[in-house]
Image (cartoon, rainbow, N blue to C red):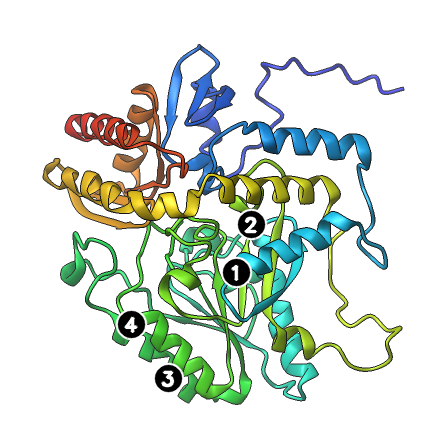
Amino acid sequence: MSTRQSVAPNDLRAFWMPFTANRQFKQAPRLFVRAEGMHYTTSDGRQVLDGTAGLWCCNAGHCRPRITAAIAEQAGEMDYAPAFQMGHPKAFELANRLVGIAPEGIEHAFFTNSGSESVETALKIAIACHRARGEGARTRLIGRERGYHGVNFGGISVGGIVSNRKVFGTLLGGVDHLPHTHLPARNAFSVGQPEHGAELAGELERIVALHDASTIAAVIVEPVAGSTGVLVPPKGYLERLREICTRHGILLIFDEVITGFGRTGAAFAAERYGVLPDMITCAKGLTNGVIPMGAVLTTAAIHDAFMSGPEHMIELFHGYTYSGNPIAAAAGLATLEVYAEEGLFERAARLAPVWAAALHSLRDCPRVIDIRNEGLIGAVELEPVAGQPTKRGFQAFLDAYEAGLLIRTTGDTIALSPPLIISEAQIGELVTTLRGVLQKLA
């Protein structure tokens, strides 16, 4: 028997928190104890309007009865089933449902447990697919500056956020990066897709000329770069990337961990922009953030490249203990049902102009140097404090929390992504509260 004493619930020392200023937090903790609909309840009993859908994930709002009931029912029926050489019905049903809402041409789903794992899986599939086709020299991966693709080694290698990369060594070899599309001098305060920057996709041709297409496996980009501060693709940019990849036999991966499941007003941003990638990575909104789960969605051509050789042999030596976990699958199915029954993707599309107008009304606030939006995503970029980057953004985060609003900051950019159930009145409340915060910033 362990002699270790139990830790009191209010002892904060043991938990090493992710992406958190741990010392600051534990001096003045911000604790949520309940959630429902559009609101969290804090440990001191205050209501906080959720302006970020948790962490870009609770697209249908919090504690939806259909989803919680599905989880409880599945836990009582069957808690776990192995995914290696065995299966259970709900994993297949969920895969079919995902393919059914994905853009035409996407036909298969490989389940993971997070967005980070979805990215790792897609990168591995890309390299292995070329090898299966007899093009084993195609191993190079192309990401983008300021891109965020999770926190595993593959993801931070193709990612382009310096703080996520700089302390972890040389990372993967054979990786190059496209330039980012943040052009504030030309595109500041654009409503929706900016007019300028499509030509930046042409930098892929320079990378191809440098390395030769025969060495490049895949390009991975977020259709809307979220964690770096909401960078909306310039008009024509994604179409140009698709055209170059197709011409050179390079696979195109859309990382839709954030943009998937209605965030841009469509099931996936690939549909919103009319550009079909070879693979889509997703997670977050797949289960409304309730249970960890992710997926890689692929075309038939990707899947079928592996379906050769003796039928008793494993085609892809990759997977996870919890791939297609029964409880996660049940949560995913219930989540998709909520999205469909309440028309939440269509609702996001209808609310997008209201959201854009409200967000851009903050243009006259002090320290605001840019505002960006797409679907129900928004960003308010603040002028940094001289010599102290991130300080003003973090202060805005703390002030908003005290004012009853949850926002997310990345550097000095406020990122917003409310649940798709938000009302027009709540959009007004969110923006009014944020205006008050911005008016007081030093």
SS type, badge 2: loop
Pick whichever of labels 1 and 4 is earlier in the sequence. Answer: 1
Q: In this view, does 403 lie above or below 415?
A: above
Residue nearest the observer in this picture, 256 or 14:
256
Q: Is residue 15 left or right of residue 156?
A: right
- Judging from the image, what secondary structure is the residue with disc 3 in? helix
Q: Which disc is residue 205 wearing?
A: 3
Sort mark 1 into few (<14), some (14-19) or many (20+) by Cα contacts within 10 Å. Answer: many
**Image location (x, y in percent) of residue 21:** 44, 33
Mark nearer the N terminus (4 vs 2): 4
Q: Which of 234 and 368 is in front in this view?
A: 234
Q: Distance between the residues labelled 3 and 2?
A: 31 Å
Question: Amino acid type of disc 2?
Answer: Ala
Which quarter of the figure has residue 299?
bottom right
CA distance separating discs 2 and 1:
14 Å
Tag 1 residue: 102
- Name above or below for residue 403 compared with residue 70: above
Looking at the rendering, in which quadrant would you find the C terminus? top left
Judged by depth in the image, the label closer to the viewer, 1 or 4, is 1
**Amino acid type, label 1:** Ala
- Report the side of 178 relative to 382 (left or right): right
Instruction: Looking at the image, tell me whether mark 3 or mark 1 is earlier in sequence order.
Output: 1
Q: How far apart are marks 4 and 2 (CA)?
A: 26 Å
Position of residue 216 in the picture relative to residue 308 (left or right): left
Q: Name the residue under label 2.
A: 283
